[in-house]
Amino acid sequence: MEEMKQWIERHKRILQKAASALLAFMVGVCLVFMIHPVKTLPKDRLLSLSRMQADSQRFVASSSKEPALEDLLSLELVREEGKTQKNWVTLSAFVKKFGKAASFTQEDTSFGAQVQLGYGTPVQGIHPYTIEFQKQDDTFYLNSIQSFSPKSAHYQSKKNVKLADFTGYQTLDGKKEKGTAVEDVLKKSGLPNSLSLTSEKDKQVLALSYQVTDGLVSLTFERDQTGQYRLTKKG
């Protein structure tokens, strides 16, 4: 009988310690959440998400038509420095001209707010065209264009193209040679495998890459004052 009392007393103390430890743990948890409360999305963030969904409905359709390469080359990109220009292309104007996109994403980056439109049927989750817009003065302007399979109404892809087919193209030297025009390259060598159109300081730069039978060719063009893209670098 005495042993039973000792057993009960000993386990009572164990249970009391366990209860005290549990209480201390719960108090600690409460203090953590009081000092570092769980963060919820602020009201303005919730509103921006709601607006983003509304914007996506304005700019996205169930199917999209891929823009023609030659039409994209005529567009003016936003400049990193300087005042807003009338010939810069807004997000709304782009969609009005080329139709609604297949995808719409918006994010805040170290460079500011950006919007990306995806055109064409995605391959492994990536759309053939990615059109990027940068926010400036409360408006999204065309910032860059990327494509891994550009299309055209005037030019076609060519087969059995070799490295030697690009040796005749001349690069701009700032003196005598003006540089081969991009149209001449597209006529002779056909459509590239990828395209990148960006702005660097006060210039618009076009980069084309070709996967040929015996290697890879990269061509860089700069747009001159007449709006013509001239070859500046071969690689």
Image (cartoon, rainbow, N blue to C red):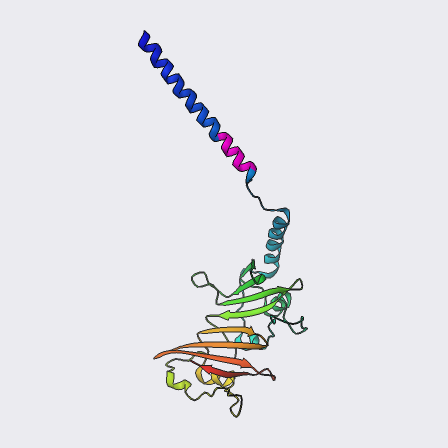
Residue situated in front as seen by the camera: 46 or 201: 201
Q: Is 162 situated left or right of 54 in this image?
A: left
Percent position of residue 62, x then y: 54, 60
Q: Which residue occupies the extreme bottom position in the image?
A: 176
Q: Per the image, is 24 magenta?
A: no
Q: Residue at x 62, y 59 (%)?
A: 58
Percent position of residue 65, x then y: 54, 68
Quadrant containing the N terminus in the rendered view:
top left
Q: Residue at x 45, y 85 (%)?
A: 188
Is residue 184 visible in the rendered structure shown here? yes
Please say if 208 is above or below 44: below
Please say if 60 is above or below 148: above
Q: Range of the magenta residues? A: 26-34
Number of numbered markers: 0
Percent position of residue 217, x then y: 41, 79
Residue situated in front as seen by the camera: 101 or 232: 232
Residue situated in front as seen by the camera: 231 or 159: 231
Q: Which residue occupies the extreme top position in the image?
A: 1
Q: Main secondary structure of the magenta part?
A: helix
Q: Is 185 situated left or right of 215 in this image?
A: right
Q: Quadrant of residue 138?
A: bottom right
Please say if 74 is above or below 5: below
Q: Per the image, is 32 magenta?
A: yes
Quadrant containing the C terminus in the rendered view:
bottom left
Q: Residue at x 48, y 86 (%)?
A: 171
Is residue 213 visible in the rendered structure shown here? no
Percent position of residue 110, x then y: 56, 61
